[in-house]
Image (cartoon, helix red, strand yellow):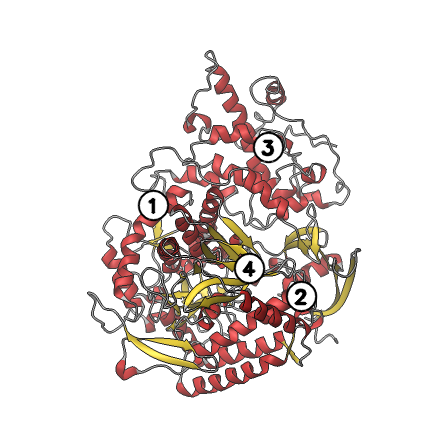
Amino acid sequence: MAAAGADVLVTKIKVYRFDPEVAKAAHYDEWDLDVKPGQTVLDLLHEVHYFHDPTLSFRRSCRSAICGSCAMNINGRTGLSCNTQAKPLLDRDGYLIVEPMKNMPVLKDLVADMGGFWKAVYDIDPYLRPGADPPKGPYVVPKHRMDLLKIAQDCIMCGSCLSECTSREANPEYLGPAALAKAYRFVADARDDASVERLKEYSQPNGIWDCDTCLYCNEVCPMGVKPMDAIMYMREKAIEATRSWRAGSSTRQRPRTSLSACLAWPPRPLSSPKFFSAGRRRTCGKSRSGGWRTSRSSQRSSRRSGRGRRSEVRLLPGLRRAG
Amino acid sequence: MKRHDVLILGGGLAGASAARVAHQAGADVAIVSKLSPLRSHTVAAAGGINAALAAGDTWEGHAFDTIKGSDFLADQDSVEILCREAPNLIVEMDHLGTPFSRDESGTLFNRPFGGMRQARAFFAGDRTGLALMQTAWEQLVKAGVTLYEEWAATSLIVENGRFSGLIAYRIADGTLEEFQGKAVVVCTGPGGQMYLKSTNAVTCTGDGTALAFRAGCALKDMEFVQFHPTSLHGPNILITEAARGEGGILKNAKGERFMEKYSPKMVDLAPRDIVSRSIQTEANEGRAFPGGYVHLDLTHLGAARIKERLPEVYQFSTEFAGVDPGKEPIPIEPAQHYIMGGIATNNAGATNVPGIFAAGECACVSLHGANRLGGNALLECIAFGKHAGAAAAAFAKKTAQIAGGEQILQQEDRRVDWLLKTEGGERVEALRLELKQVMWDNVGVFRNEQDMAAALAAVRALRKRYPSIRVGAPGKQFNYALIEAMELRNLLDLSEVIVMPNRDDPNWLKHTLAWWRGDRIELTYEPVRITQWQPQERTY
């Protein structure tokens, strides 16, 4: 275990262990490993599993950040072990601790029970609901319109965002960022004909109005997906749809709002002061008494607020973070 | 015991397509997969899916390119089916929700791909596989198809020459259970983990191929293994061919654009086998960088265009190689990527064993002959996944379930028990690493008689050592060491077929069929089916 040259760093890797067949309580195991530049956390876990302790369990498959199997908590932050370089982390923190994802029960070692994650995704009707008359060829959708999906379409369902979601932590019934990003992917899709119904459904309790906008999901996503942006977009569109419903509601009949009316392009950027102005927020409050029910806004404090991880996070103008 | 009409083994794009169609045909369908479907290796497919959909393109053009790319060893009637159906499949996937990239007028973008004379690869950024897989999975959720996730199949049951079910091991709790079914579609995808350098996922161990082989299905053309020219030097993560489709240039250590020498017409966009051999030749003749890699230069495209069209290339280069492709060239080397061979099927996906069907990479129709062109694999998964699903549902409809897997279940139970308790001296991973080294050194980018003979002897020796392995983990829950031991057996069995000397050049234009005979492997041959394109010299 001697260090061979300056590029090799002998270090301890500390790993969360839990085996319900052996003991009820969890513990940590440590191994001394040579960490070479370029090695990922997954490489180190493989080394432990292959050559030190075959009983160590963790999910993995593609090792190229595309299958979503290997999300875990690495030095306090959830991410994919396969694309997390070990040495920079060691240089930064001086230690390496690997734990399973949060907000999910642990099944064994680093294997988390993703049942709740998948249930939320299933709950949002995760499939296109197209109109009755599809064109003969592909749908004609201009690039800028299709590009709306970009903030969500690369989701690999790894669960990192749910693991870090403060709203989910406070409310286990909350659908969570991945499911709502998936929901957005259909709301924003010009080919989907059920956007208004979807927005109505997602506005139920535990949906888009239950996000406490902590931004962790945007921050930790290994694929650059922006679940919180997606949620904010859906909030805006839900309000617009409610308005157009009201405007034409003399007959108490909901007009079939066309997509182009409902999802006007270009949408105002999310950071637009207009949207987040006090006036808009009041509108949002009013709507509770009327058409759609929007649930309570989250007024919770974040348990992580003191950990200095927010340095990069800029609050959107006019947005007040709870707590 | 569980019972369904049609069992789908593997939940990737081929499996999901087969399940969707079989479900639509009214069959009770269940997917059994050792991964969650969205974790399947389909998601790693990056660059595109081919179809003659653009104005001025013809399916015949697509078919000819595919056949020429295959070195005329693809069955031409099968290729015709693939290429005729391709445009409709793109439209179908678009209607189901795949977010194909488009231009401002709303038409689908396409781009050039290796070995294609015309730009006909449609794409969703450079995460086309992910996008198609998501769509296929969404349709499974919509249809309510039963999913058995994280169940690793250990055996296919064949009673009186007919399929009757399979045995699968539940990774979560160590349960071994019999799944009865009238038909199975094997869609377990790749098995490239017997190579040291491979773009395949760690879980790509050819399980379904090996299971079908041992159950009596013939394997066709297993010697044809594709080496992708551009995998990231070191971790061998795939840098999509689309990088060259968008204008990427290969350069050796002297800064020469060496592909001009090997492929004057298509240069960097020659088919993969040719580019890989060219890179290997450069390395063998001392014109590569130390460590045997060359450069893929994208800097002239500019960071903005790379991020727009090739976001994954950008991500991989920065995360895994610490290289910004907008500023520096990417270090790349060839790595095993695809196995053209597989379970021999007809155009409906049926194998020689009634009730066993196969589709996707684990199958061999044959659509790709000796070399697959980029953008045809995703297409094959959808096209022949659907054919196999339909054929399996039709077979199940006219067939009665036969019982009788009890004995096999007990046998598999004893085997798992043995694996958990055995205390041999061979570490599974050490054996696997030896195998990977042998395969890479001897039957890599180039194959010759002497090295193949050495590989065959080495693989046979490794197979003899398998019984003295040690798993080292006794647990029932998430015992991945046990799964790896089962995977190693599959890899060893397939490796022997891959290294068997089976070329017969005087009688070329033949498919090689390998048959499992318990203690030995037997080879037979059948002719390649030719419809309208006569073999010609393959220059690019």
Q: At x 62% / y 74%, what residue is drawn?
A: B429
Chain containing mark 4: B
Q: How much space separates mark 3 and mark 4, taking CA atoms?
A: 33 Å
Q: Quick one: label 2 or label 3, which is nearer the N terminus?
A: 2
Q: Relative to B197, does residue B314 appear above or below in the rendering?
A: above
Q: How much space separates mark 1 and mark 4, taking CA atoms?
A: 31 Å
Image quadrant containing the C terminus of chain B: bottom left
Q: Relative to A104, does residue B230 appear above or below in the rendering?
A: below
Amino acid type, mark 2: Leu
Chain containing mark 2: A
Q: Sort mark 2 into few (<14), some (14-19) or many (20+) by Cα contacts within 10 Å.
A: many
Residue under label 1, please give it: B91
Quarter occupied by residue B376: bottom left
Amino acid type, mark 3: Ile
> At numbered mark 4, what does the secondary structure look like: helix, strand or loop?
loop
Amino acid type, mark 1: Val
Do circles 4 and 2 both sit on a common chain?
no
> At numbered mark 3, what does the secondary structure look like: helix, strand or loop?
helix
Residue under label 4, please give it: B34
Q: Position of residue B461 (x, y in %)?
A: 54, 85
Q: Position of residue A310 (x, y in %)?
A: 70, 43
In the rendered structure, are the residues bearing label 4 and label 2 in contact, judged by CB atoms less than 8 Å apart?
no
Residue under label 2, please give it: A44
Do circles 1 and 3 both sit on a common chain?
no
